[in-house]
Amino acid sequence: MLTPELQARLAAPLTLGPFKIHSRVFQSPLSGVTDLVFRRLVRRYAPTSMLYTEMVSATEIHHLRNLPQMMRVDPHEQPISIQLFDCRPDFMGEAARKAVAEGADTIDINMGCPVNKITKRGGGSSLLRQPEVAEAIVKAVVAAVDVPVTVKTRLGWDDDEITIVEFAQRLAGAGAQMLTIHGRTRQQGYTGAARWDWIGRVKQAVTIPVIANGDIFSVDAAVDCLTQTGADGVMCSRGTLGYPFLVGEIDHFLKTGERLPEPSVVTRLTWAKEHLIGLWDYKGQRGIYQARKHLAWYCKGFVGAGVWRDRLAQIETVEGGLALLEEAIATTIDPR
């Protein structure tokens, strides 16, 4: 449970220079997930939380005449951050200016993605092995924009190279105004337990806000993490897959000490219908294919969920998906 002192601190706005965030709970940027449609669902439960776009390549922005769709934001979805990645400081500065013009309240730099196709190009967690480049990128972005610049990163490359404390100090010195630390190394990917103790060490080593990320799947996990690390907030990632309620549930608890009732199976599947329609309206047929994984994620925690996951993972049309969801709603018994 939260102590009164900790709850008071976490209920207060988080200040990044002149910018205030009125929530200590963040929705992580997730490639292929946190598009405009998903963010709208999260926002409904979490009206003041910082949301993030999918990460966008600064090189792609440099070479394209028009901004990629994943970089577009709704003018009514603030606070919103656009996350960028690259290894070229000049391209990152250019991309940051375009992101601010698009409506970004902050610019987040990805220095944690473990995927090979990103690290081989010098981006993501490969920057943990290139601290001078990472520092130059932060300086270039800070010089290019007048909004807060933040960084999301990991503990290090592997267990033999856990460099996060010194790395965090360099980023703060370069002008980063907030750090989000995923408590795993690049080698871990998303396996094993997040090592929150290292996040606590970073919090002790820097004066800027530190956000804890990794294994935040519930209100209780968020409270445990904040208590153990002393972090200034938490960021939810995989816990929101098929469950866009999580950010709002944690935010509500931190501010009030009260738990929101868990959404029923019918509610979750009804939101799945809305998610499907939104992806169809926003992306057309490509949205249908992307919806397959989302609909499968919604189907968990009730009898027969596996059967519905298999069927929804094969939909070809919005009508077919809606028919399956409506059938699931009509025939599913809530285990509660």
Image (tube, rainbow, N blue to C red):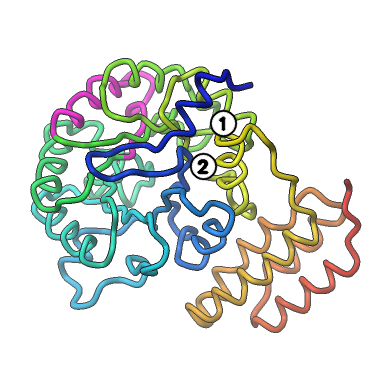
Quarter of the image for residue 210 reads: top left
Residue type at numbered disc 2: Cys
Name the image quarter holding the N terminus. top right
Q: Earlier in the sequence, mark 2 or mark 1?
A: 1
- Are the residues flagged by discs 2 and 1 in contact, CB closer than 8 Å? yes
* Quadrant of res 256: top right
Residue at which label 2 appears: 236
Q: Nearer the viewer, residue 125 or 71?
A: 71
Q: Which residues are magenta?
A: 152-174
Q: Position of residue 328 (x, y in %)?
A: 83, 67
In the rendered structure, the answer to whether residue 50 lies left or right of residue 123 reads right
Q: For the residue marked with disc 1, what is the amino acid?
A: Ala
Q: Secondary structure at mark 1?
A: helix
Q: Residues within 10 Å of mark 2 (few under 14, many from 20)?
A: many
Q: Residue 286: horizontal and vertical position, in percent?
A: 50, 77
- Give left or right: position of 280 versus 136: right
Q: Is residue 93 above or below residue 13?
A: below
Residue at x-position 22% and y-position 31%: 129
* Count of number-bearing discs: 2
> Crowding near pointer 1: few (<14 within 10 Å), some, many (20+)?
many
Give the residue pinned by disc 1: 222
Q: Is residue 161 magenta?
A: yes
Q: Residue at x 14, y 48 (%)?
A: 141
Cα distance in 3D space between marks 2 and 1: 9 Å
Residue 277 x %, y %: 61, 77
Above or below, 218 against 64 in this view is above
Q: Going 88% across and 46% down the picture, which residue do you hit? A: 336
Q: Which mark is residue 96?
A: none
As drawn, is 239 to the left or to the right of 125?
right
State yes or no: residue 157 in magenta.
yes
Q: In screen coordinates, is 238 left or right of 154?
A: right
